[in-house]
Image (cartoon, rainbow, N blue to C red):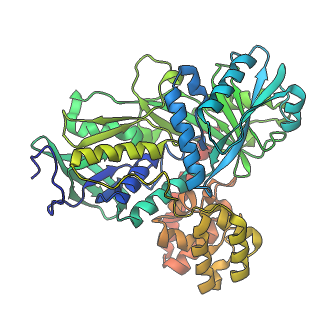
Amino acid sequence: MLGSPRPGRENPRLDFDVIIIGGGINGAGIARDAALRGLRTCLLEQDDLCGATSRWCSRLVHGGLRYLEFAEFGLVRESLREREVLLRTAPHLVRPLPLLIPLLAGARRGPATVRAGMWLYDLLSAGKSLPSHRMLDAAATRREMPGLEVDGLRGAAGYHDAQVRFPERLVLENLLAARAAGADIRLRTVAERVLVEAGCVSGVLLRDLRRGTTGTLAAPLVVNAAGPWVDRLLGSLAGQRQRRYIGGSKGTHLVTGPLPGLGASACYAEAAADGRPFFIIPWNGMTLIGTTDIAFDGDPGAVHSDPAEVDYLLAEARRLFPAAGLSRDAVHYSYVGVRPLPAAAGKDQAAITRRHQLRHHRNLARGLYSVIGGKLTTYRSLAAQVVDRLARRSGRDLAACSTHREALPGALADPVPLAADITARTGLDGAVAARLVGLYGSRADAVAALVARDPALGASLGSAHAIAAEIVFAFEEEMATSLADCLMRRTMLGLEADLGAGVLDGALRVAAEQLGWDAARCMAERTGFLVETAALRRPLQR
C-alpha cells in the first residue's frame, strides 16, 4: 500500500499520519505536539496511562545537578530550560522545591566540589525564575533542617529545583490536550506488531484488551515510545537478529510519614554505602526516600523491589536523621520503576547518559522510530524533536512547535481565588475546594459544576477531603475505565498513606449509584484495586 519512501500528504487510505505506542510522559508529549501541529495522531497504550516508569520516579522536575560530574552540560542546560517551561505552563502541577545538600567531613564530594557545581548550575540556568544557590554553615543548616544530626556536618548548599507531585496528572493533561487537538487516545490497547510493506511502515496490528478484539490501523509513521518495552516491539520485527537498545535500571522509592526535622526542604545527600546521591523529599504530606540504581534486564511488568533495597534506603536515611527512628514499620509503601536507559554493556549505571536518543530503524521499516531513554523533565523538548523528525520524513509543512508557550489544560497560577469561588458557589468546605484546585487546577471548576448540578456529588468519600464528583469526573472526562485507574492515576487517592482504604467503599458506592455498576462489577473492581495496592506493600513483608 505504501511503497514510497516519503509518505503522501493526505492519503485517504490512511487512518492516521502517525501512531504513537506508549502512554507514558514521552508518548503523551509526542501525541500532544503532533496533534497541535496538525498530524492525524493516534496513541496506543497497553495498560492505563502513566502506568510504569513515568509515575514510579522521584517526582522531580530538575536540571540534573549530578550530570555535571559527567560533563553533560548540554543535558543540564536543556533540563534547566525545560524546568522553566513547566513552571510556566503547568504551575498547578509543577512547583518550586528548595533542597539542601549536606556538606560532610570525609564525603566524596567535598565543599569545594559542591560549591563549584552550584556555581555552574546557576550559570547554566541564567535567567531562571528560581533563586540562586546559597552556602550555609553548620548552625544555619541545623536551623533549616533540625533533624539532620549526622556526624561531621560542616554546612550545606541550598538551591532550588521543582517537584511534580503527581506525574500521573502531568501525563493525563498532555493526553487531554492531545485529544482536544484531535488525537485518538486508545488505552488498554496493545500494539502487537508494526506492519511493513515494501520496506516501509504501513500501520499497526493491535489488540483491544477491553473488547477482546483485534484489528489494524494504517499509518506511514510509527513512534515506539514504549519505555522499557521498546525492545519487545522491535523484536516482533527483527526476531533474534535484533540489537538491544534498552539497558534497564531499577529504581526503588520508599514512602513514609512526615520525617521529623526535615522541614520544608528536600535533602539531597551522598549515600555512605556507595557514594550514590539520593533524595529525602517532602511529598504529599509524607516523605519520599529514593532511589536505587540497579541494572535490570527482566520483564518490566514483573519488576519488584528487593528487601535489600528497602534496607539500604532506610539505613541511609537513618544515618542522616537518626532521631526519626526509621524502620520498615514507618514505611507506608514502596514503589519501583525501570528506567529505559540506552544499553551500555559494562558501564556503571550512574555513568550511563540520561540524554534521550531517537532511532530511525531504516533496516527494519522506514518510518519506524524509537525513543530511547529520556527524563521526565525534558519530555516536552524530546517531543518537539520527534515531531520535527516526523515532519521531515512526511514532507509535510507543519505548524511550528507551540508547546513551550501553550499552557496545559488545568494551568492556574493562583489557586486561592478559584477555591474561594468554588466554596461560595457550591457550599463545599474550604479544605475540599483547596484539594480540588490543588489537584485539577483550573479544571476544578468543571468538578465543582457537577456538584452545582447535583449537590449529592458533594458528599465525602470518607477521607482526604475527597468528594463523590471526583469519581464521576474521572470516568466521564478523564478516560478512567476501572476503579484502579480512578483512585491510582486520576484522583490520586490510592497513593495516600492508607493506599486508598479510607475512600474505597465510598468510591464503589458512587460508582454503583452514578455509573450503574452492579454487585459483580463492584466486587471485581474492588479486587483489581486491592491487587494493585498490595503490590506496593509486598517488598516490606519479611
Which residue is at 42% across, 52% downward? 28
Which residue is at 29% across, 41% downward? 369
Q: In terms of image quadrants, where is residue 148?
A: top right
* Count of residue discs: 0
Residue 242 in percent (x, y) is at: 25, 30
Query: As displayed, is residue 332 above or below residue 183?
Result: above
Which residue is at 75% across, 68% downward? 431
Asked whether, in this view, residue 106 is left or right of residue 202, the answer is right
Query: 203 or 119: nearer the eye?
Result: 119
**Visible residue check, residue 226:** no
Residue 417 in percent (x, y) is at: 71, 70
Query: 456 or 109: nearer the eye?
Result: 109
**Visible residue check, residue 39:** yes
Q: In terms of image quadrants, where is residue 268?
A: top right
Which image quarter holds the C terminus? top right
Query: As displayed, is residue 159 above or below residue 107?
Result: below
Query: As displayed, is residue 322 above or below residue 514?
Result: above
Residue furthest to the top in view is 106
Residue 16 in percent (x, y) is at: 24, 58
Asked whether, in this view, residue 10 is left or right of residue 378, the answer is left
Query: 198 or 472: nearer the eye?
Result: 198
Query: As displayed, is residue 399 above or below residue 65?
Result: below
Which residue is at 68% across, 77% downward? 459
Residue 229 in percent (x, y) is at: 37, 40
